[in-house]
Amino acid sequence: MHAHTASSDQVFHALGDGTRRAIVLQLGSGPASVSELARPLPISLAAVVQHVQVLEASGLVATHKQGRVRTCHLVPDALLEAERWLAQRRALWEGRLDRLEALVHARSPVDGARATAPSIAPIDAPCEEETP
Amino acid sequence: MHAHTASSDQVFHALGDGTRRAIVLQLGSGPASVSELARPLPISLAAVVQHVQVLEASGLVATHKQGRVRTCHLVPDALLEAERWLAQRRALWEGRLDRLEALVHARSPVDGARATAPSIAPIDAPCEEETP
DNA sequence: GCAAAAGTCAAGTACCCACTTTAGTATTGG
DNA sequence: CCAATACTAAAGTGGGTACTTGACTTTTGC
């Protein structure tokens, strides 16, 4: 239903550039015009405009033009979406860790555990750093 | 103190690539060898190795080699760090929104408010989409 | 011991994209 | 009206990097 639902692909690609992250950083402390964003940056104004376009396409920032000045501001929803993407991977992974740990810590053979093979990769040894 | 503290720069750059995110996705559901990671991908094994190297340098994944097989797994800490970066920008921005809203909703002139200009960008009008 | 499997290393190519320059359009203040 | 200001649009250039290929090393199954 949202006007511009950006794929997390675009979001992460947008955040993949240092200059763009600097812009997001600056926008974190308030809305700014394109020239204001450009001022601290060591690149041309045109370049900043291009970055803003990428950020806008990603949904991370929104802009509105009034007169001759375009004002940019962050869109928290997009930030949140990216955050959730990361959180999900992490949760999935940590969930696995928890289950593994549960298995390891189950000194007494627990009946509740399914007879199905854990499908978790067997960790045979504490394993050294690189086997030379 | 951590052995490999990756800059969030490297983390976001790593996540900026689609193939790399696909790898992270797959690793989300369990550790995998390089060949396993390569199987569903439409690229050569060597390319996957390179991606894994980038991910490892970013701190997002760790690997250990046993015999001839290198096993990769996610590092939740790195994920969490990126998550926090986003959360902080968002919090900052939403904090601003809250303060603004507080000002707007202050129907009765609050004495507690400083006489200093709010340094918050003035929002004069509900403003239309683009002024043609 | 040999061959297949699983990576590793080094070049090389091709494409993407960050950035520049140049030229142009609205908008605003005096 | 004139000159700044604040972009906008288009084209071009260079560097980075994703990906390939081919040769080589190590491990493992038979």
Image (spheres, coloured by chain):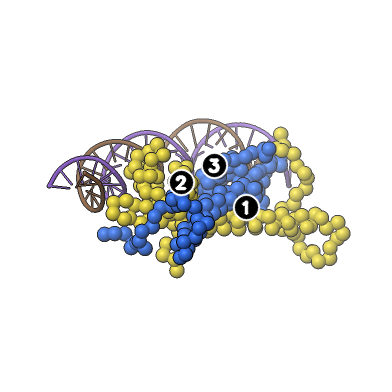
Chain colours: A blue, B yellow, C purple, D brown
- Mark 2 vs mark 3, foreground winner is 2
Crowd band around label 1 with a 10 angstrom C-alpha radius: few (<14), some (14–19), many (20+): many
* Residue nearer the viewer, A102 or B130: A102
Indicate the position of residue B45 as horizontal and vertical percent values.
Answer: 34, 42
Image quadrant containing the N terminus of chain A: top right
Query: What residue would you read off at disc 2?
Result: B26
Q: CA distance from mark 2 to mark 3?
A: 19 Å
Residue drawn at point x = 28 percent, y = 54 percent: B67
Crowd band around label 2 with a 10 angstrom C-alpha radius: few (<14), some (14–19), many (20+): some
Q: CA distance from mark 3 to mark 1?
A: 19 Å
Q: Amino acid at mark 1?
A: Leu
Crowd band around label 3 with a 10 angstrom C-alpha radius: few (<14), some (14–19), many (20+): many
Indicate the position of residue A130 as horizontal and vertical percent values.
Answer: 31, 59
Residue B7 visible in image = no
Q: Amino acid at mark 3?
A: Gln
- Mark 3 vs mark 1, foreground winner is 3
Residue at the far front in the pictured view: A111
Q: CA distance from mark 1 to mark 2?
A: 33 Å
Disc 1 vs disc 2: Cβ atoms closer than 8 Å? Answer: no
Indicate the position of residue A131 as horizontal and vertical percent values.
Answer: 29, 59
* SS for callout 2: helix
Q: Which mark is residue A27?
A: 1
Seen in the picture, residue B76 relative to C5 is either above or below; the reply is below
Residue A114 is left or right of residue B71, and the answer is: right
Residue drawn at point x = 69 percent, y = 58 percent: B95
User: Marks 3 and 1: same chain?
Assistant: yes
Q: Amino acid at mark 2?
A: Gln
Seen in the picture, residue A25 relative to C22 is either above or below; the reply is below
Query: What residue would you read off at disc 3?
Result: A10
